[in-house]
Amino acid sequence: MTQPFLPFTRPTIDEETIAAVADVLRSGWITSGPKVQAFEATLSDYCGGRTVRAFNSGTATLEVALRLAEVSRGDTPITTPLTWVATANVILEVGAMPVFVDVDPRTRNIDLDRLDAAIRPSTKAIIPVDLAGLPVDRKRLYEIANRHDVRVIEDAAQSIGATSHGKTIGSIGDFVSFSFHANKNITTTEGGALVLPDDIDPKLCERLRLQGVQRFPDGGMDVDVLGGKFNLTDVAAAIGLGQLKRLAEFTARRRHLARLYFERMPQNLGLELPPADFENSNWHMFQPLLPRGTDRGVFIAAMKDRGIGVGVHYPALHLFSLYRQFGFKEGDFPVAEDIGRRIVTLPLFPSMTDSDVDRVCDALIACLGNPINERVPRRVGFMDGEIEVPDDFDQISAFPPEGGN
């Protein structure tokens, strides 16, 4: 019997949440209203009582954060070239120009060893990205930012539920931007949230979120700042409330599935696996690197023929046509370019079964398998380095114990 297609991700939305959405639709109030306020309050509780405002996308949250940080024309915020293009696009949107710093080959996040040298007088902000839900080391990041007196806008689009140094992402720091896109660990179908530092006026954030409008008790209004149309609907917020209740459950399931990949991944395929971090990462994605010389398009098509969906997250964005016109070129960031050419996203989402991992591994063998007498040691990137895994290594107990909050 043909098995159903296994996508690389799929949202998990329960009947209680579907019923809550129906209640909102019946209520007659479907745009921003009481559900958005409840969602913001629940997110605030999750983030340790910090002020949180909900938006209609994680792109909008980044743009508004840049405006609140007073980043504008002539400024050069720093970010990574290995991210969804929105991270850099919003910098252009506010009139600034991105400065890219290459990534660490182990974590695939911005290389903190290179960060100091990239900071210049026009650097008002650093935008680190937690690729695949593995957080940038917040302690080191803020030591660098504080030393240079620059703001941090954490692009935590993929890392809700993750931790760094025992602290939940969003509970400390400067600006923190979350995304609730359909492929994220929790979703509002489309949406985002911005965690605000104490020195930022939430009312200004709200005006930037909705056309700059300020309303008065007598029914009058004023517009004193150029805002956008970035408000979240109550329909979306109802989904978010249902999802947020299950965040810990989803994170635990993702970590379990990631462990299974490490345990069951064929060891003779030459794949480079991500860091085996089960304490900090929320395992938003499971992303091996293909062996050099592999035709990724052919691989993706072959996996699809076997009923397995594979994504690409992400090509190095400085090589897109838009950014080449600003002078970026091949060879500028060789680590990001190499990863961007070889990275693939394998299925990982809470409703996957353990046997689905076996399906993926079987498909990998069919698409990449070497003869049994040409076994290649699997390389695993732990947070403190890289090791070769022998052929008989299959004991999950050898990996670090799961931690977290």
Image (spheres, rainbow, N blue to C red):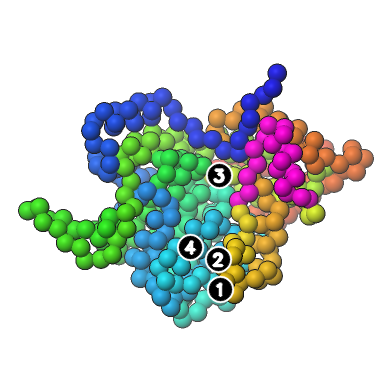
Q: In the rendering, at what x and y percent does residue 110 appear? A: 58, 63
Q: CA distance from mark 4 to mark 2?
A: 10 Å
Q: Answer with the quarter of the image where residue 109 lies.
A: bottom right
Residue 89 badge: 4
| SS at badge 3 | loop
Residue 284 badge: 3
Whether residue 183 is visible here, answered yes or no, is yes
Say whether marks 2 and 1 touch (CB < 8 Å): yes
Residue furthest bottom in the image: 121
Crowd rating for badge 2 (residues with CA inside 10 Å; few <14, some 14–19, many 20+): few
Say whether marks 4 and 3 touch (CB < 8 Å): no
Q: In the rendering, at what x and y percent does residue 235 appear? A: 33, 37
Residue behind mark 2: 322
Q: Amino acid at mark 1?
A: Phe
Mark 4 or mark 3, which is nearer to you? Answer: 4
Q: CA distance from mark 1 to mark 3?
A: 32 Å
303 to the left or right of 316: right
Crowd rating for badge 3 (residues with CA inside 10 Å; few <14, some 14–19, many 20+): many
